[in-house]
């Protein structure tokens, strides 16, 4: 990665903002389809929180290049998105959605906790606001993970299967790359190694409570945060961006 | 893993009480379904405090509430009808007393 220092902050903000945006778009597909009315609203609330976070982060990321949040959300192709690959994975069944949410919430919780001490004031402020929301999100996803894992045979099986299927995307969350390193050196980024420590603690504890087995970690890592995505992001963006691209600049 | 009891078809019903920002007492705001009380609290947060309505939530299993049978209403309340003296309306209120 060869970001010059003035591109570094926007790039970092896009990693965070795109992760929130893509996850929000994914979750929004549950609205009207959740297993119960109460869950429908629960997921919709999280969707809106994530969208709010994405708006703050994308707006800030666009300042230096004079791009609006909408330019960034609707005007970029998949390889220009820098979300972590886990966020773009399809909803699957409810267990897959919960596993994806929980693993990301644990990552977001540790990341934003560290970012409240960022030397970039605006980012620290956004982290502060985001953290209160993430604390609720992880409560929701953690409780469901435990409930399903420690539930019936069927729910246990589905929860374990979801974890097994999504585990290969967790490497990326905990693996430092050159951009992460440069951001920590510049003083505004979260130390990924510190994130990994608290992430592992959180996940170990919850999996034990949920009577679920931690899947084997494979050496392969995805690099959505560098713009190299799984096949799913392009399809999702095509849907998310279709209206904005058919009617550029439309107001309502 | 043994399955001690068969899964329930529907979640039980809970009644939700929210204490508004400006009030002292919890008020009944509605009901919802949840697997248990912990989840009922979260559902209540998601359903009934989306617009900053409250600062505190109680949830109670609906089955824990004993309600009066409407057919018994006469027996319960009619006896109070002819006892107007229970209302403090027989006192002369002095001129000087305002805002009573």
Image (spheres, coloured by chain):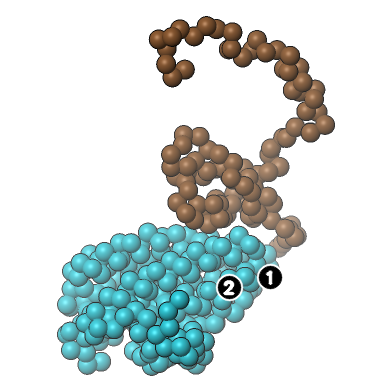
Chain colours: A cyan, B brown
Q: Residue at x 64, y 49 (%)?
A: B31
Q: Residue at x 46, y 37 (%)?
A: B23
Q: A233 above or below A162?
A: below
Instruction: Name the residue nearer the viewer: B12 or B71.
Output: B71
Chain that bears disc 1:
A
- Give the residue at the far right of this rendering: B71
Q: Residue B53 appears at what percent x and percent y?
A: 48, 48
Quarter holding residue A62 = bottom left
Q: Residue A154 got which mark?
A: 1
Residue at position x 41%, y 64% in the image: A134
Q: Secondary structure at mark 2?
A: loop
- Residues marked 1 and 2 touching at CB (< 8 Å): no
**On-image quarter of the N terminus of chain A:** bottom left
Q: Residues within 10 Å of mark 1 (few under 14, many from 20)?
A: few
Q: Chain of mark 2?
A: A
Disc 2 crowd rating (10 Å Cα; few below 14, some 14-19, many 20+) is some
Spatial CA span between label 1 and label 2: 21 Å
Question: Which quadrant of the figure has residue A201?
Answer: bottom left
Residue A103 visible somewhere in the drawing: yes
Q: Position of residue A130 (x, y in %)?
A: 35, 64
Q: Is circle 1 on the same chain as circle 2?
A: yes
Nearer-the-camera pick, A95 or B20? B20
- Give left or right: position of A15 versus A161: left
Quadrant (top left, top right, bottom left, bottom right) of the C terminus of chain A: bottom left
Number of callouts in the render?
A: 2
Observer able to see residue A156 = no
Residue at screen point 62% across, 76% down: A93
- Please say if B8 is above or below B83: below
Note whether B92 is above or below B32 in the view shown.
above
Q: Secondary structure at mark 1?
A: helix
Q: Is A33 left, or right, of A80 in this rendering?
A: right
Residue designated by label 2: A30
């Amino acid at each position: 990665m060869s970001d010059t220092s003035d591109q570094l902050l926007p790039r970092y903000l896009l990693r965070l903002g795109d992760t929130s945006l893509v996850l929000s778009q994914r979750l929004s597909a549950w609205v009207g389809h959740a297993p119960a009315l109460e869950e429908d609203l629960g997921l919709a609330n999280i969707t809106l929180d994530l969208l709010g976070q994405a708006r703050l982060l994308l707006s800030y990321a666009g300042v230096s290049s004079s791009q609006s949040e909408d330019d960034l959300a609707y005007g970029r192709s998949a390889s220009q998105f820098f979300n972590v690959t886990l966020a773009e994975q399809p909803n699957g069944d409810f267990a897959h959605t919960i596993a994806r949410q929980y693993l990301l919430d644990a990552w977001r919780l540790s990341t934003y906790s560290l970012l409240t001490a960022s030397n970039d004031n605006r980012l620290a402020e956004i982290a502060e606001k985001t953290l209160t929301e993430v604390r609720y999100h992880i409560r929701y996803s953690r409780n469901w993970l435990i409930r399903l894992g420690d539930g019936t045979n069927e729910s246990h099986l589905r929860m374990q299967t979801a974890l097994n299927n999504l585990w290969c995307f967790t490497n990326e969350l905990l693996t430092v790359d050159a951009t992460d390193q440069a951001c920590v050196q510049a003083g505004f980024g979260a130390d990924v190694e510190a994130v990994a420590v608290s992430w592992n603690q959180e996940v170990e504890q919850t999996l034990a409570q949920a009577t679920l087995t931690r899947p084997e970690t494979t050496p392969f890592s995805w690099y959505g945060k560098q713009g190299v995505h799984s096949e799913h992001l392009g399809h999702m963006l095509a849907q998310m961006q279709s209206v904005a691209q058919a009617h550029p600049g439309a107001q309502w | 893993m043994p399955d001690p009891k068969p899964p329930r078809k529907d979640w039980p019903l809970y009644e939700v009480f929210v204490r508004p920002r400006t009030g002292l007492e919890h008020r009944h705001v509605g009901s919802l379904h949840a697997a248990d009380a912990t989840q009922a609290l979260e559902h209540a947060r998601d359903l009934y405090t989306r617009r900053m309505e409250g600062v505190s939530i109680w949830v109670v299993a609906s089955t824990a509430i004993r309600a009066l049978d409407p057919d018994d209403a006469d027996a319960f309340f009619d006896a109070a009808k002819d006892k107007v003296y229970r209302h403090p309306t027989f006192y002369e209120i002095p001129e000087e007393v305002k805002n009573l």
